[in-house]
Amino acid sequence: MASIAVIGYGVVGSGTVELFEKNKEAIRKKCGRDIEIKYILDLRDFPDSPYAEKFTKNFDDILKDPEVEVCAEVIGGVTYAYEYTKKLLSAGKSVVTSNKELVATHGAELLKIASENNVNYLFEASVGGGIPIVRPLNKCLAGNEIIQIAGILNGTTNFILTKMIREQLDFDSALKMAQELGYAEKDPTADVEGYDACRKICILGSLAYGKHIYPKYVHCSGISSITLDDVEYAENAGYAIKLIGNVKSVGDKVFAMVCPRLVSRTSLLAAVDDVYNAICVTCDGADDVLFYGKGAGKLPTASAVVGDIIDAVKHKGRALSISWDECYDEDYVVPYKSDAVSMFIRLKAENADELKPYLSELFGKLIHIERKGRPDDEIAFITPSYIEYDLDSKLEELSRYAIIKSKIRLL
Ligand code: HSE
């Protein structure tokens, strides 16, 4: 009998228990032996739960029970989760998790502890919710050099942007809906400001390039300043605005960044709406490979957690080859402004159209964009591609004559 513990009974934890119990018989067959959830750890009381007898508030019940082989850490954060995970792995128990913050911050260390103890630390659920991406990247695409990974990695922001584009819903109402549907993190700042997507691109980049990419070195901006005007201009020019995380190799370093971008309507990523995520991996052999599915939510995320539980049970006593090295080079992530990029600009100036000749002189060939009812003091355009440092200098010059209201990079 393989005994499992679920640590945390929030959205993902309760989904994990629900999916596991629903498919228990099939899971038993896949594992090749009996399997049960023996403990659920949560500080709250759930007296009416059908699993009430499994609840404990004492972490040591799990740590000290030799029957527990695999623990699903789904509490999130980097305090208790970090301490518990280290203790469990050191005690010879595998840990599976949806905790992207913990993997992105301490992944290299935790993977090392797991390997030293012949157990597994698996985190398929930490990126892309129900989308299988960690294993394919680590195994199926292992024969390739990964040129770039770019994707929509946050369900909440994609849901909000879709509502803004399709239904002209304002930002706050769309965020409230996402929270009610269980997509958003407890503190939605992590979703809205891009930190959640940043953690995910760091995990994918660490896997792809073999060295830990720490979120603190990755430039990250979110969607809270995107306006319905920007959305309309983008639409009129044939683009959708999406929060994009991307990572690519630059010699022996990496470029990594999270920011809203204009994505051409001809790209598959532009068609990814609502809570769906999509991750495009570009490699030298397989070329472009696109992974698509529900990136957030109770059961999609539980699907990945339960898949990892099964894998951990099947590989008892054998550490799967999944790891990357610690990185001590603070310059491993190159400055984001060293990349070449085209930019969408919306500005305010008196009689803005009169600036057009000056803008052409400053930037070269521009694409001007219109919108219905565009006020006289507003103009919007897309610049040619420049190294972002150079683009900044041009914008600084421009700011002598106009107020830059929006700056959104193109993908
Ligand atoms: N809050 C996250 C999202 C959950 O919206 O994508 C899944 O990681």
Image (cartoon, helix red, strand yellow):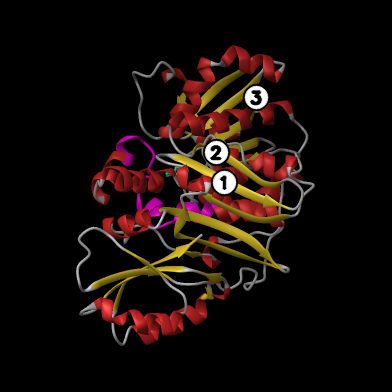
Badge 2 amino acid: Tyr
Badge 1 amino acid: Ile
Along the line of sight, which residue is nearer the eye, 270 or 197? 270
The response on whether ligand 1 sits within 8 Å of label 1 is no
Q: Which residue is mark 3?
A: 67
What stretch of residues is rendered in magenta?
Answer: 178-200
Q: Which residue is mark 2?
A: 292
Along the line of sight, which residue is nearer the eye, 316 or 156? 156
Along the line of sight, which residue is nearer the eye, 386 or 274? 386
Residue that sits furthest to the top in the current view: 25
Q: Which residue is mark 1?
A: 279
> Marks 1 and 2, Cα distance to the nearest angstrom?
7 Å
Q: Secondary structure at mark 1?
A: strand
Asked if residue 54 is positioned above or below residue 205 in the image, the reply reads: above
Badge 3 amino acid: Glu
Q: Secondary structure at mark 2?
A: strand
> Marks 2 and 3, Cα distance to the nearest angstrom?
37 Å
Q: Secondary structure at mark 3?
A: loop
> Marks 1 and 3, Cα distance to the nearest angstrom?
38 Å
Residue 126 visible: yes
Question: Are the residues flagged by discs 2 and 3 in contact, CB closer than 8 Å?
Answer: no
Asked if residue 38 is positioned above or below residue 84 in the image, the reply reads: above
Residue 141 falls within the magenta-colored stretch:
no
Residue 230: x %, y % from top left = 32, 60
